[in-house]
Each structure stands twice: as structure tokens, then as C-alpha cells.
Amino acid sequence: MDDFVRNKLSEWGLSMLIETFKDQEINEGHFYNLEDEEIKELIPKVGPRKTFKRQFKLLKETLNSATQVLPSTSEANDTRNMDMDPREESSQCQSPSVQRKRYNSAAEESIMWEVKDIMKVVQMKLQDEEKTELNDFLKNKISDLETRKRKLVGVFGRTGAGKSSLINAIVGEKNLLPSGSVCACTSVTFKVEANNDSKKYEAEIEFIKKEDWKEELWFYKNLLDDDDDDAREKLTALYREDWKIKSVEELMDKKYFREIPEFLTWNKKTLKCESAEELSDKIVKYVSASNDEIDAVRQYWPLVECVTVRLPNKDLLQHVTLVDLPGNGDRNKSRDNMWKKIVGSCSTVWIVADINRAVAEKEAWEILQNANSLMGNGGECQRIHFICTKSDDVDDQSGAAVRDVVLKRNKVAKRKVNAEFKKQYPQCSKQFSFEVFTVSRNEFIERKHLQPDETEIPKLRDVLQSLNNNHSEALNYVSGARGILSLIQGTRCRGVADSKMQAFSILEEKMRHELKVLQKTIDEIYRTFERCLTEGVEESQDSCKGHLKSLLHPPRETGSGFHKRLKFAVKNNGVFKAKNGRKKNINMTLSSELTGSIDEEFRKTFPNEDKSGPFNGAIDLFSLDTEGMIKTYKDVDLQLHFLKTEEDKLKTKLKEIIREDKKTVYSSLTATIEENMQKCYTDAATITGTGSLENMRRTITDHVHDKKDTMFQMAKENMLKQLKELKGKILKNLEETLMESIELSLWTDDCSFPDVSVELDLVETFYSHLEANPNPN
């Protein structure tokens, strides 16, 4: 009997059978091949036998799940409960291909968990072995198999555009988000994801720092514009009328935060409920500024940075997080930094607008304008979806006419929005895929005139399902496990020293050659960036005076009104809101020629698409060709299989490192300008009295004039330095990680390692299933 059998019996609550299976010497291989008569003989009692057979059936189905055939849709409909919730019923109405995709997704998840169980058993076996360098290496490799990362979908749109209703419908929770509540305060980031650890409805509330709120209060008390409705709304929500008569110190009194002691200690607040409705009632004061029923109750959303809601039993969100984002960041530094980080981490962005005003909706298009650089070169976005809501909102019509009107208007809206996107953002089509959806939330639920597919909510669910990408996750995990088991089994083989030595020499030589090729490619790209940035520095020096004039002397704005805005800007690192509400950033404007000079080259070098590799595909082209060596060096084929999986894993990891580092590289241009501008902001912030507006303008203008010959050049040098450091990190990772794997796999024999041939055969079977049966697209 082995650990696998013992662990399975314990996991199924059948520990009393362990001795019986041990006496019969049943190992993992025998376990999978037990027949009904043998099970009856092993487990004579009916209760335990039924439990065993139920669990045993599920376990065996995992082996064949990827190739099983679904029941027909007619069979599914015959067994459907007629009183089923419309959201659940809609899933039954999907096409067979969509059903199969979801079925395969669940099967692949099951395969991955089964392989995880196998690797846990192997890891326990390694714990019992003598502590050696190879033993530690293998245990670390098993731990490193856990690399799952959530995909972020950013949802933008003004209050009233139908975001709350859309999210409710997509996640299948009618009462989770009150209509109009999400981010009505234009500051709270709101996340929705699956609760993979509990059956509870949970919310995790993150607050801003107490010190940041005190600083924000000072701004409001000293620099509040008469037309700053957002600030007044925040202060009234938290303090009622007290903010008008009390000082900053008095407003920081603990009595205002008795219900949220976590704010004072900068801890997270967690809420757990049995239903979505209960959770919605509890979180409303932390996310909403629009609920008239709670006007008499103190609201805490002004102090909240982010609310994360986790929902049970949501396979659709298992590896995906919907992030409802404010439109233009926030004056609070921590909230603004979180906003930038999340926008830069979104792989997909949804822009939500009412279909009746989609093309004319200024806020929706401004979101794209403001977040474009953060999503593209400064982020990892691949897809932008423009979602027109309320498409079923039509004038009174008879039944058949409603459907015709809705579908015709949907077609027109898609054509116009696509045309507007191409007109306003011709460059974006090179970087993002763009698609328009026209959704009808009410029709999706009530189904009076439209079929579920015609509401397009099922299409958005399919978007989320594709982002879950269980097939890729499962294949990567199983492939990694297969490689590790191959190495363990390969180390048990003796008498192949000559083959190992020859293979080692060849791989060492290939490593040196491939690293030189990669370094040459990156160096050529570096020189291209150097040329682009040199031009950008010259253009920046020539244009900075004009850029400053447009910022510091806005047309049609009185001196007193702009005085407060500029005063706020110099106290807020150069960032402020113009009279029309649009966000202005002095640093970003000054660095615009620099970023513009490299934008096109940066897109080609660091594409956001999964299919295109960074550095013009140079990482993908790097190869030790271990597969090509297997025919010649069959004695060490297991070790070569391991090295192939290690190379693939390392290249995937490097792409993730590059994806994150390239955000910092791109933003370094503006960051350097901001750093160089700090002194003039500090100086301007101290200016008061008569003529202070002109004195602030002069302070900023003179500083830029004095610094223009150095600060743009410094920005260029900083970016090139970071590119050089990224090159060093890539080459070092490849050489050190692969050489360690090559040396330990080809210079080590250890017959004392456990025999994992049964586990390897099982994982090979799983791997073959996954390779042969990819998810349908």
C-alpha cells in the first residue's frame, strides 16, 4: 500500500479501511483498476461501500472527462426544473459548443486538482528522503507549480449607465448591487470575484491611510472650490454639517470612526453574510453616495479605497475579477495610485454607456483618453469592449415590433460606435481589439421579446469564461508535474554516465550560443530606443514653453477660479482638474513628446497580446532544443523531458516579469519629470498674497526654462538604464535557472529516490488528454 491510497481513503472519510487495503497490498496502480466484485469483497458493509463507490466513480471519471460526450440539449431541457431561476435557465439554452466549453473547463479543473493531489503525495515522499541539494530543488519545483493569477476586467462608466444592473446579471445575483450604487461617489474601487474558500458572501473593505485623509481634509477646508460638488458630497456623507464649522483636528476625532475602528489602525474590515441581499445592505454605506434612504446614517465611502466582494459558487469568476473603477482616478494619493495600478493590470476593459447616448457620451470617450497610456504601453490590456446598455428601452410597441426595433437599433449603435472609435483613436486599433456589445438586462431576465443570446449577456459571460482559461492553466500545471516526475524517475537510472556527460556538454554549448543571440537582439532594440529618445528630448525642449502656456493660461477661465486650481496642483504634484472636469497633469504634458517618440517602438517591443512575444519574439526563439536531442540520447530522455518543461516554464515566467517591468520602464519618463518638478511645486505652494497667481505661474515657468536642458535628458537616461537592467535580469534568469536544472538533472544519480513510475504514467495520461482535447473556442 502507498501514500496515495492512504490519503484517498482518509480524504473520503474511510480511514477505517486503511488496514484492509494495506493487508491486500493495494497500491495506486491497483487502486484505479478495482472491479465491483473486488470492492464488494474489500468493503462488505453497505454504507462505507456506497461512499467509496461514489467517490471512486468521480475519481475515475476525471481520467476520461476531457473526452466525454455531453447529453443532448433536448435531454437537458426535459429534466429542467420549470421553476428554475431565469439566470440558471439561460445557461441551459446555450448552444452545445458553449455547453461543451464549460463542461470541458470543469473537467480540466478536476484534472488539475487530481494531479495536485498526486504531487502532494510525491512531495511527502521526498520529505522522508535524505536532505540533498537535488531533494530541495525538487521540493521547490513542486511548490513553484502554483502560479495561478487572476485576470482583471476593468469596468468604466458614469453613474446611471447601468453598470450595477449589468454586473448583477452577468454574475447571476439579482440583489447584489443596488442600481446606481457602484462607485457613485467616483472614488471607490469595487471588485467582484469568486469565493473559492467558503460558501459565504464576503466583503473585504480597505481604507485609505488616516494620515492621507487628514491631508485631504486640509485641502478641502483650505482650497474648496464653490463648484466642487464631489468634495462637498464626501464631507457631508461622513460628517453631516459638522465639516462646515469644525477644524481639521476636530474632524479627526475618534467619535466619527467608532463604527470603523479598522480605519484608525489601517486594517481591513471583513463582512460575512449568508445571502447577496444581506451583504448588499451591509456594504452600501461603504460604496454608495446615492441611496436616499440612508441620508440620516453616517456613510464611510469617502474613507474607502477598495471593496472586494467574493461570491460563492461562481465558476465564471473563478480566475477572473471584475473591477468597477472610478473614471479619472482621485485626488487622494493612495486611491489614485491604486487606480493606476489596477488599470495597468487589466487585460480587458469594458466601457459602459447608455445606448441612447453611446456615441455622444463624453465621459465614456474621456475614460479611454485618460487611461489609454496606462492600459496600453503602461499596462497589459489586450481588449476594449464598448457595452451599450438598456438596448431594450424602446417606446411602446407590440411584441414582434419590439424585437425588430431593438435589433435594428443595436445594429446601428454597433456601426456608429465602431466608427467613432476608429475616428478618435486610430492608433488604438494597432494595440487593442475593439468590440461593441448591445445588452438588454431586463430582456435577459424576463424574456418577453428577445432570446437570451440576443440580449448579448451570454456573450459577455463567454468573454469571462474564455479569460478563465482552465485549459491553459491545467496544461501548464500538468506539464510541469510531468517534467518533475520524469526527473525523479530519471535520477534512479544508473550506468548512463557517458550519455549524461555528452548531453551536458551539448546543452552547455547551446546555452552560450542562445544567450549571445538573445543579447544581440536586445542590444539592437536598445539602440533603437536610444535614437527615438534623443529625438524626443529635442522635441521636448522646443515644445515645453508652449505646453506650459496652455496649462497655466487656460482660455475662458477667470483668475480667481484658476488660482485655486493651480494652488491645488502645486500641492498635488502637478495634478488637478480643469474647469470642465477633465484631469490635467503638468508632468505628463511635459513628458508627452518623450513618450510619443517611443510609443510605436514600445508597442512592437512589448506587445500586450499573448500570442506575440516581447523583444520581437526573441524570448520565444530562445531554445536548447532538448526535444531534438531525445532520439540521440534515449538513455537520458526523462531528464531531457524535464529540461524541456523547465525551459517552457521559465520563458512563461520571464514574459510575466517583462510585462510587469515594462510598465515601470514606460512610466519612468513621466516619473523623472515629476521628480525634477518637485522643487518648483514646493516653492509655488508657499506663495500667498497679492499677485500670487502670477508668481506661481512665473515660478513654474522659470523652473522649466532652467531645467529643460537637463531634465528631459535625465528622463531619457533613466529609461535606458532601466532597459539595460531588464536585459541583465532576463539573461541572468535564463543562464542561472537553466544551468542549475541542467547540472542537477544530468550530474546526479540517486537510487534512493522513490519510484514514481505509477504517478508518472497517470500524469502522462492526463497530459495526453489535455493536449488532444483543447477547449473549443
Image (cartoon, helix red, strand yellow):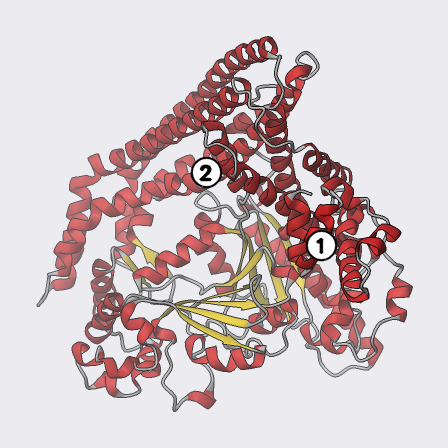
Q: Earlier in the sequence, mark 2 or mark 1?
A: 1
Q: Categorize mark 1 by other alpha carbons within 10 Å: few (<14), some (14-19), many (20+).
A: some
Amino acid type at circle 2 is: Ile
Q: Residue at x 63, y 67 (%)?
A: 171
Quarter-wise, where is residue 11 in the image?
bottom right
Residue 511 position, x and y percent, is 50, 17
Q: Residue at x 51, y 71 (%)?
A: 202
Pick the residue in front: 136 or 738: 136
Amino acid type at circle 1 is: Ala
Residue 229 position, x and y percent, is 35, 77
Q: Mark 2 points at which residue?
A: 657
Pick the residue in front: 24 or 603: 24
Q: Which residue is drawn at 66% across and 40% down?
A: 475
Question: In this figure, what is the number of numbered marks?
Answer: 2
Q: Residue 645 carries which label?
A: none
Residue 85 position, x and y percent, is 74, 76
Q: Mark 1 points at which residue?
A: 106
Q: Is residue 216 left or right of residue 65?
A: left
Task: Report whether residue 470 is seen.
Answer: no
Task: Report whether residue 464 is seen.
Answer: yes
Pick the residue in front: 261 or 751: 751
Q: In this view, does 718 lie to the left or right of 443?
A: left
On screen, residue 148 above or below 247: above
Is disc 1 placed on a helix, strand or loop? helix
Q: In this view, does 37 lie to the left or right of 562?
A: right
Quick one: which residue is furthest to the front in this view? 23
What's the distance in space between the residues labelled 2 and 1, CA to CA?
A: 29 Å
